[in-house]
Amino acid sequence: MNDVFLRAARGEATPYTPVWFMRQAGRYQPEYRKIRERYTLPEIVRHPEVTAEVTRLPVRQFGFDAAILFADITTPLYGMGFDLDIVEGRGPVIHNPIDTAEDVRRIHLFSAEAHTPFVLEAIRILKRELEVPLIGFAGAPFTLASYLIEGGPSKNFVKVKGFMYAEEEAWNLLMRTLTNAMVEYLSAQAAAGADALQVFDSWVGRLTRHDYERYVAPHMRRLFEALKPLGVPVVHFGTQTMHLLSPMAEAGGDVIGVDTTTPLDWARDRLGTRPVQGNLDPTLLFAPEPVLARGVEAVLSANTGRPGHIFNLGHGILPGTPPDAVRRAVELVHTLSEVRT
């Protein structure tokens, strides 16, 4: 196996900077769009062979140093008693959102083997075929709670914050329930063969530092403590989280994901020897090649040659991204970082 990604995740020196991209399998690929003509996103996830093919595609095409399992952060929620759809252009829509404390108490106990066996089978298939590490993943409790209370994506997060402030006891029960479920889900992925894990807290940057430390951090600490015995590197990632860098790092994670709004050198100075992942602006993949090359060079320069850097985007690949730009970005990361070492 090409283990450069895993070595970087452990903070070890590597011959070049490993690179993978969030949403590296998806709508920008013509091959994926053809598959979507036959299957919806939830249907892909429920067919392990199709999931494996979609997961492998970008690794074969672009030379990424890691594969990330194709799924959605809402996948476990079906087994927890929620009725939801993935709506094209909008995202997850919850038809029975949480409105009251009683709704929280009705959530079903989650079992990865019972409710997501297709995810685990896809991992087993991929482990027989991949020559790079496989990353499993889950949504963080706050981000999942946001979908469940808001009923879908939100711009202002009024409902979830209102519930958090007014129903603190029920909020903590919800966070404990989601934390337990994600520990179960991620542990099962590691047992099935995932070489690393990532926890996506996509919406947590909408909280103040005070609210994060009061309402979220205790649950995240428990989640990462529970994952330690798995023995695989865990990436902790959120967006718009520059103001939360320190409390998120204190909460846990072997690698801290850095989004586009957080300067990589600033983050590295504050995290010490903790490995980091990031943080090219995804829109640079639409730029002329010289501009893209400058962007890649800037991220590598911000790392200043320190070990423990995994090159990634500051968020996921955007729809409409030119595949040739993805290929070129991977080549640039490999070539420019190899020259540095």
Image (cartoon, grey):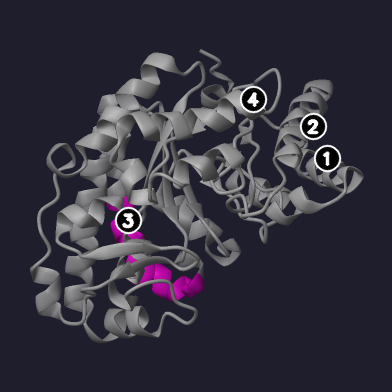
Q: Please state which of the two labelled residues, at mark 4 or mark 2, is closer to the viewer.
A: 4
Query: Would you name the residue on which mark 2 appears?
Result: 332
Magenta residues, as a range?
A: 206-222
Q: Please state which of the two labelled residues, at mark 1 or mark 3, is closer to the viewer.
A: 3
Across the whole image, how many numbered discs are drawn on residues? 4
- Can residue 229 be seen here? The reply is no
With respect to residue 218, does 46 lie above or below?
above
Residue type, numbered disc 1: Glu
With respect to residue 147, does 262 lie above or below?
above
Query: Would you name the residue on which mark 1 appears?
Result: 297
Mark 4–mark 2 Cα distance, whole angstroms, equals: 12 Å
Q: Residue at x 76, y 28 (%)?
A: 331
- Of pointers 2 and 3, the one earlier in the residue sequence: 3
- Of pointers 1 and 2, the one earlier in the residue sequence: 1
Q: Which quarter shows the C terminus?
A: top right
- The image's mark for residue 63 is 4
- Give the SS element for disc 3: loop
Residue type, numbered disc 3: Thr
Residue type, numbered disc 2: Leu
Q: Please state which of the two labelled residues, at mark 1 or mark 2, is closer to the viewer.
A: 2
Callout 1 touching callout 2 (CB < 8 Å): yes
- Give the SS element for disc 4: loop
Query: Would you name the residue on which mark 3 appears?
Result: 74
Mark 1–mark 2 Cα distance, whole angstroms, equals: 8 Å
